[in-house]
Amino acid sequence: MMRITDKITSGTFLSNNRRMRSNLIGSYTRIMTQRRFNRVSEDSINGTKAMMIRRDLRDLDIYDSNLSSVKQLFTEAETSLTKIAHTNYISIEEQLTAATNGTHDQMDMNIFATTLDQIADSMVDTLNADFSERQIFGGTNNSTPPFDIGRYCVTDENNTVVYPPYFYDYYVGADATKKQIEEANDVLAKLAEYNANGTVADDKELASMKQTLDKLGISLGVSEDDKYSAAVKSENGKGDTVSLLSHDGAPQTITYSEAENPVIAEVEAAAANVTANGAVTDADKEALAKLNLTAKVNDDGTVTFKDNKGKIIDMTNGLPADIKDNVPKEITVSAGAAEISKQIENEVKFHLTMVDVPRAVTYNGIPVDFDVMHKMTDANGNKFDIQSGSKFTVKKLNDDFTWAEGKEIAPDVNAAVKGRDNSLIFPGSDPIYVDIGIGIKYDKDNDYKVDPQTALDTSFNGAAIMGCGLDDEGYSKNLVQLVLDSARALRNGDQSTPNAIIDKAKEANNNVLIEIANLGSKYNSIEFYQDRNEDSRFNLRERQNLVEGTDMETEISYFESLRAAYEASLKVGTQVIPNSIFNYI
């Protein structure tokens, strides 16, 4: 009976001792971690609340990370725009003011023009700045630099040039043209040899030959029995196609000739008539207008000639060299004129004409002055010349005066119409919204687009910032394009255009300054949201401490009582639990 009693007593003591030790360890853990519980199962109600608080704290970390990244991005953007609006603009204004003061000769103006071109190139380099593998001013385009300077043209679906507004024939030099002629003659001779020998060109060679002939407007045909022919369409209005290379015959040699444009002689003759007769006839007026010149007989009998910019032109010795050199020469290419003239009424000829395309700024592949908004026919935005889905082709002039392969574009006319903002036609103009903790919402009635009032737009539409389209006077709204236009005008001896551009550049620069001010406002907003998030974090941590935290004063008192009880229990245990011989083995 004594053994049974001892066993029961020992078991009860050990069970209570283990429970007391477990409570002691638990209290110690709560003191060291300062957490009321470590598993939700220990306190399911407060555990659920704690998970929700932790979720909110995690969201605050995300918002702070977003705000920090955007803050750095805005700082970089402001630095770049400040360089343009201050450093570059001051240089632009100084150069234009000096160039248009009327004291410089053409050589000086050419130097000013070169300096302005260099400033434009520098501005584009600044606008193409990359920050953390992101094109700052590219909008949603992050794959290629958004801005470029080159020679571009845009054609519509009818192949009509819609940009640039002044698109006219331009003589690029006899050397380049003659080289094309020589290459074409070599190709025709090679094709004639193939026809004679029954040889067939491989696909790569044939493609190269076709490209060479295409430069001269010659089409290459291949018959079913692998015989080659080449034909050129005449310009006599009859649409005749004349064969340069028949299937079995030898090629007719293509010849080249150039002559001074007869308009020059016509204008000089008209100027001489006005000077001699002291009167301006309709015929003289019409002739002078071909080179944008006007004549006025003064009261003293002298005659004053002016260009379309109001600049006085000295016609004493005929057209000045700077005007004469810019008049396109007549370049005629004939193919076997004597033989062909027997086949059709007029000698077959076609003009090798390149186009004088001024240096243009493009944004995401589209010239900044390509303006669809001016095509609108209704001020309320109801009727438009350009319909949604209209397609255009953008081509760039290569260094060898050949056109690169055209890139087809379909500007988002609906977006431009809705926003009355021409910049919206450019690719990459969509916003990039970042959640900064003000409750981002999506408009289900508008294709679930983000409500702009509930997020921060971090996209920089470079076309909108620097300007795009044309104003009512036909000047570009883009600051960089205005610099290029002024340089081009100075090279042509035109000082009135750069003089007008001084004010236009100031307007465009003001838009950049406005964007810098907007950045400052957004920057202040970011700091406000960061402070607000910090306050929210403090409140959440206070709430978290109330839900999860240990009441240290109570818990320490409880721990000390448990420890005293446990130590007393151990002492009592030496009396309760009998010794055994096994304790001494």
Image (cartoon, grey):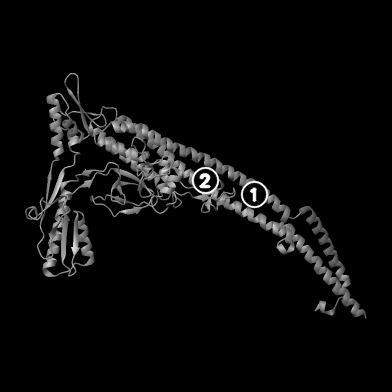
Residue 328 shows up from this direction:
yes
Q: Looking at the image, which residue is at 76% across and 62% down? A: 26
Q: Residue 460's x, y, as percent?
A: 45, 46
Q: Residue 242's x, y, as percent?
A: 14, 57
**258 in relation to 281, above or below:** below
Task: Name the one closer to the observer, 232 or 454.
Answer: 232
Residues packed near mark 1 inside 10 Å, few (<14), some (14 to 19) or many (20 plus): some
Task: Name the one closer to the observer, 436 or 271.
Answer: 271
Which dot marks residue 537? Answer: 1
**Count of marks placed on residues:** 2
**205 in relation to 380, above or below:** below
Q: Looking at the image, which residue is at 17% across and 70% down? A: 225
- The residue type indicated by label 2 comes to Lys
For label 1, the SS is helix
Residues packed near mark 2 inside 10 Å, few (<14), some (14 to 19) or many (20 plus): many
* Location of mark 2 (residue): 71
- Image quarter (top left, top right, bottom left or bottom right) of the N terminus: bottom right
- The residue type indicated by label 1 comes to Arg
